[in-house]
Amino acid sequence: MKNIVILISGRGSNMQAIVDAQVPGGRIAAVIANRADAGGLAWAAERGIATAVLDHKQFAGREAFDAALVALIDGYAPDLVVLAGFMRILTAGFVNHYANRLINIHPSLLPSFTGLHTHERALAEGVKFAGCTVHFVTAELDHGPIIAQAAVPVLDDDTPDALAARVLKEEHRLYPQAVADFVAGRLLIDGNRVKRSG
């Protein structure tokens, strides 16, 4: 059984999708948030999942927070750490500590539109397809070997909210599958590429 720790900052809809998927061979060991008011905490607790809060505002800087976060996460002996709407830029030390077992989902077809406001930027650029990307996390923001992607068409009358809602449906499908592939040992990192076996 592989222990999975999920980090959230808000309602945790991707966390909920992963929990609901009941990944074979995976156990959600904990859901951790950097905000006490993160809605996903209550949802997880109601399902008997251990939860914890580590408020980044209580720390002098990013390094101190990340060191405390590592100590908290490691208490759950994680095989995989999943970022599910965790709105913190992580230090290289944190990322390296969890190298090849830290994954994220980003609401664009990376490497396009890294960072924030992805849907507004996609519409402004006039792209015909948008989507989401699951990737291993590296020290470079929204980079790292791509595990999976899903695309949706951009419609002529799209708004950022409408596009975001359509992409989110794909996130909820794609992320649990990527977690399942990791847990089953089907993901092989080869340089900057991820190959899927089995």
Image (cartoon, helix red, strand yellow):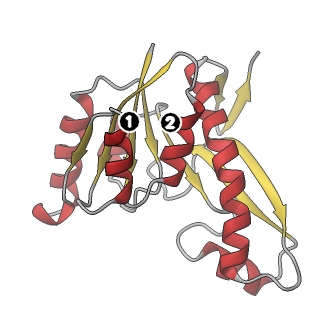
Q: Which element is circle 2 on?
A: helix
> Whole-percent x and y of residue 20?
55, 36
Q: Is residue 56 above or below residue 102?
A: below
Q: Earlier in the sequence, mark 2 or mark 1?
A: 2
> Whole-percent x and y of residue 66?
24, 49
Give me the residue at 46% from left, 57% from top: 85
Give me the residue at 45% from left, 53% from top: 12
Residue receiving disc 1: 47
76 sits left or right of 142 in the view: left
Residue receiving disc 2: 19
Q: Answer yes or no: is residue 111 visible.
A: no
Which residue is nearer to you in this view: 95 or 37?
37
174 sits left or right of 45 in the view: right
Give me the residue at 59% from left, 66% from top: 114
Q: Is residue 173 above or below residue 29?
A: below
> Whole-percent x and y of residue 57?
16, 66
Q: Are marks 2 and 1 in contact (CB under 8 Å)?
A: yes
Query: Distance of mark 2 from mark 1, alpha carbons?
Result: 9 Å
> Whole-percent x and y of residue 115?
53, 69
Q: Which element is circle 1 on?
A: loop
